[in-house]
Image: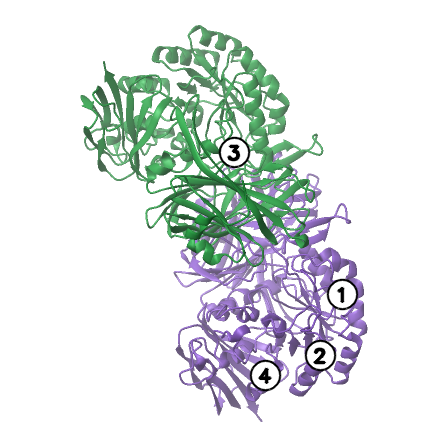
Chain colours: A purple, B green
Amino acid sequence: MRLLAPLSFVLALAPVVAHAQAPASYGATSPDGSIAIGFTTDNDGHAQYSITRKGKLLIAPSSLGFILSDGLPMLRGWTITGADTGKGDSTWEQPWGERRYVRDHYNEITVHFRQSKDWGERLMDVHVRLFDKGVGFRYELPKQAALSTMKIADELTEFNIAGKGTAWWIAGGEWNRYEQVYQKTPIDAVATAHTPITMRLEDGTHLSFHEAALVDYSAMWFKRAEGQKFRSTLSPSSQGPRVLRSLPFNTPWRTIRIGDKAADLVENDLELNLNEPNKIGDVSYFKPQKYIGIWWGMIRGDWTWAEGPRHGATTERAKQYIDFAAKHGFGSVLVEGWDKGWNGNWFGTGQDFSFTQATPDFDLKAVTAYAAKKGVGLIGHHETGGNIANYEAQLDDAMKLYDSLGVRAVKTGYVADMGGVQAPCAAEPAKICMEWHDGQRQVQHHLRVVQTAAKYHIAVNAHEPVKDTGLRRTYPNWIDREGARGMEYNAWGQFANGPSHEPTLVYTRLLSGPMDFTPGVLSLEGANHVPLASTLAKQLGLYLAIYSPIQMAADFIENLAAHPKELEFIRQVPADWSESHLIAGEVGEYALFARKDRAGEDWYVGGVNDATARDVTLDMDFLTAGKSYKATIYKDGEGATYLTDARHRIAYETRVVKKGDKLSLWLAPGGGAAIQLKLLK
Amino acid sequence: MRLLAPLSFVLALAPVVAHAQAPASYGATSPDGSIAIGFTTDNDGHAQYSITRKGKLLIAPSSLGFILSDGLPMLRGWTITGADTGKGDSTWEQPWGERRYVRDHYNEITVHFRQSKDWGERLMDVHVRLFDKGVGFRYELPKQAALSTMKIADELTEFNIAGKGTAWWIAGGEWNRYEQVYQKTPIDAVATAHTPITMRLEDGTHLSFHEAALVDYSAMWFKRAEGQKFRSTLSPSSQGPRVLRSLPFNTPWRTIRIGDKAADLVENDLELNLNEPNKIGDVSYFKPQKYIGIWWGMIRGDWTWAEGPRHGATTERAKQYIDFAAKHGFGSVLVEGWDKGWNGNWFGTGQDFSFTQATPDFDLKAVTAYAAKKGVGLIGHHETGGNIANYEAQLDDAMKLYDSLGVRAVKTGYVADMGGVQAPCAAEPAKICMEWHDGQRQVQHHLRVVQTAAKYHIAVNAHEPVKDTGLRRTYPNWIDREGARGMEYNAWGQFANGPSHEPTLVYTRLLSGPMDFTPGVLSLEGANHVPLASTLAKQLGLYLAIYSPIQMAADFIENLAAHPKELEFIRQVPADWSESHLIAGEVGEYALFARKDRAGEDWYVGGVNDATARDVTLDMDFLTAGKSYKATIYKDGEGATYLTDARHRIAYETRVVKKGDKLSLWLAPGGGAAIQLKLLK
């Protein structure tokens, strides 16, 4: 329905109307009426939106638009010509995930803008979906006479945050593997951030700004202009325009998760709902699982990726790891450094990598055959050093080889500096154009890898990736990404990931999607015996706190074997859930989840704590009424603390619990807990 | 001299040496030894520098380098192959300025870096000049086999500020005419700033970060990465690389003014000294002067730039203004809106502007002839609406016309949105490429305008300019720029420039060079009688606080005439000085200068205050011993305040003062003062 008059309910949006200079304003509300968006134009014809929640201004009037490399800015001279509204309420099923069923319940409005003759008579639609716990909007550029392609110099979408508060963020446009320690600052002390960026306003409102369905576009960085006003700036391109698209096309959704409490951010499927349904069909070739790998030894420096006397990826060691995996219920073994090209400097150069030729001391065919015999998979590995020219040239052959050997998952890698991705130039493919990790070209590349992998029934676990924007819904063989500071940093320095790191990741990076954090360093030490900022119980809690459909046990197998009780927990804990709930937690402090095994009736509870010891009381309300569960509890031992050798103190307990029970836990400094709740038949 | 061993004095740079991983470190100190810079490379071969002052770390190790659009990053794999040192001490004379003679006293070091084979074997020199009150360094890219052109995707120069403190800044990469109100925040709450950005550390150290000699390169924005670490990011280009240069070439200097007090920032010729000497010869065709204009009426909305019944630029009004100028000693009259092209929307479009054709109601030839007869000059006007394609096509004709009519100065204008400058594309000049106000293309354009103007003996006063980086030394017909929020904002809203604005400009924008602020609104009101955040005395104080070799009296001539005493001060006050000293002031609070008339022995004292009333006692130490001066004082009247009609209260006083006297002044809220000290013969 095309509305030619303002929607009556925008009359309730007093702050919007107060700013409106234009004759007509348009708006819409979430299904429960709590969130409202309004659109208007100001005296200069800037297209603007604002958002209220429960009648209170949340996003003050904020401008929309683009600057172009080849034509007048799409910033001024806009008028609203009308709007369409709609709504949706459906439930869809995930092949794997934190929950099996996802409800997609929204109202929507598409506001139609036209630029005046002076400004080129361009058309632009803004399509909004309002959910009870968030908003997404995107630009839709219809086919039009005035514009056939858009050379987008930058997207200038403002986010003018009305309330003061605190932000948790990492720097955008800097060291571009997202591998920084999160910063906690006032909102008005953010510099330029990657998304998702999490905020808590003084009135308790929790916010997370991000994007959904980042396809054939550059990633959005969240640049603070001044005060509390942010705007988008797109990851650069070697080509001038940061994005080049033919019309018609849609931008990614700009998303805001909104809620009263931290759990509203965590239990929120906003971005997934804004992505398109599965386009690749059945992905049952991928099984959620735990895995081990020939990896921690290279990270620590005991072994090497490169060939030589300390080469990690030997046939012999691979078989040893396969044996261990088979014995302890791990689904796969990751083998890094199996291929040629690691000798010399590969960081950011990568021209020598082969994705089909193994090193002389690694018999890929023999190893995969051995694994198959043992019922174990191999997780393949494609490190590119950021050289996607080299990778793309071999991509099909590389995936075909893995497919032929039954390898059903591959970990990719793009280790390079900012602006350090080498791609074939569009205009002259024999030349190299340097791109950013999260620019349009690399966004295209990642999807190409995932689509090629899908063709060969292979799942992709991307490291040094583009951030996740919910594309696993559309391409569910895209199972996992790194895209944050993982366990590996603990190998490189004492407390390199501080005790707050994981309880921050839960409310920031993890909002974007699964992370291959690689928990399970049960020895609690990195290279040169540097300790982790973690108790032993926290290592188990990570399997509940940080969701991934593949969960590593990262330590050396000898260290895993030295902890038989913990190893048994890791064997038992699922990597696929029918339900997930944050049952206790605050951003950056602690996070305890209850998750239900997708394969049965058992529940698992656990999570992580920061540096502050705390007592928590967990409500067992999520359990099925009338049933009893055997709780096997792994918790911080008395006096445990990450600060001393007492980090190894763990306590075990079993008891029977029922719905309505309360369970008290003491969480050590840097501690955690993990509980299996097995349904008693 | 090429040094093959570390300089012995870097041993004193303990923090540098502590971070050094490389075998050799190189460094140098300022002539007085207070400032030291050290260079090293880290384990990954990052080229790094650090700066200490009085033995204390000021800039912690900070990386240097570039990313390229067409080749591997110039970030890693560096080794230092040697260094050359040198020194200089000379004095040069300005044709006009805040002081006649400028001392250029420095030590210098050029550190030679070579990148390893993996990284392309590129060469890069870093050339540093150390002064007693600051440091400048630039990249020098020598002719080399590995690199013939540089397509610079970005320059990644870090500035890792060691001490906490306060910053005064405007947002970079945003609304790009620099016309924001300055923000005062903690250093670690800066977002991305334009330079100069001013800081005061907790230990009292004053800093200003800027650049010098911005030629054929993009302006540097000062992006905070996180914490107190900043890095350069260059203004974008439509072409992909933000800068495109053939080797050999030098970047602009990255500069840091350093001192113990605010005056050390203000009385500091760092950037001027880092620019090249005069390249255009005698500029005596330009006389420092005061001027009036047909301008405030358009700003207020009483008159229009466009033709029509309220057209400002009529022959009749121009003659009336010329008569007034002649009578009251003004050198010139600015006439805006004299040319065709103002009808319809010109903001950001500008395609209709003619720079040679006057409107029918304005007889350019008759007006200039009339002005000449009266001994008054005309200041021409070239508003482009950011359309430099249109302007460049007419540039030579436009300057030739003015020259033929004896017009010796032109005000240029580039009113457009960010990324809104329309330039002919380099590869295809018939097409339009959109550029930033401060990108390489616009930097080239401004210099082209200034060079063309010089050919015709015309001075340039650029509005919506690229920021000043001291190029007036090399091109002294580049007399002035806007590049900050000027008086005009006061026409548009009550206290639109708050009382702190001018006392902030002195220590921020004004550090970069002269500003056409356009003081002298003696009526103290804008459109619809909105009041200025200024007392009457402050309007006179502005002629001392804000330096420019052309100083407007911006008000309607009727309003000027209504204040005969103030008008007489404006007639008397010079716009050219042999000495200038900040004799009292703090950043953002107040600023009082003593300046000596370049044409004689008289001194002038005056300045501006923020919202806080204060008593200041000024030392008359700058006066010549044994001489007496007649002080004519214009000061805030009793009870004056910008907050009420009491803003008009002014007091006059005369007395005799000598060197060694103290002069007490009360500065009203939003007040100021102006004093003429006439040598008694």
Q: Residue furthest bottom?
A: A681
- Contact between labelled residues 3 and 4, with CB atoms less than 8 Å apart: no
Q: Secondary structure at mark 3?
A: loop
Marks 2 and 1 share the same chain: yes
In the picture shown, does residue A424 fall above or below A497?
above
Position of B5 compared to B681: left or right? Answer: right
In the picture shown, does residue B131 fall above or below B678?
below
Position of A345 compared to B595: left or right? Answer: right
Residues at marks 4 and 1, CA–CA distance in whole angstroms: 30 Å
Q: Which residue is mark 2?
A: A318
Residues at marks 2 and 1, CA–CA distance in whole angstroms: 18 Å
- Contact between labelled residues 3 and 1, with CB atoms less than 8 Å apart: no
Rendering coords of residue A117 (x, y %): 62, 34
First of labels 2, 1 by sequence position: 2
Residues at marks 1 and 3, CA–CA distance in whole angstroms: 49 Å
Q: Which residue is mark 1?
A: A355
Residue B213, numbered circle = 3
Residues at marks 4 and 2, CA–CA distance in whole angstroms: 16 Å
Q: Which residue is at the front of the view, A305 or A246? A: A305
Q: Secondary structure at mark 1?
A: loop
Q: Which residue is at the front of the view, B528 or B541? A: B541
Viewport quadrant of the N terminus of chain B:
top right
| Amino acid, disc 2 | Ala
| Amino acid, disc 1 | Phe
Residues at marks 4 and 3, CA–CA distance in whole angstroms: 61 Å
Residue B440, numbered circle = none
Rendering coords of residue A482 (x, y %): 61, 66
Q: Chain of mark 2?
A: A
Q: Which residue is mark 4?
A: A560
Viewport quadrant of the C terminus of chain B:
top left
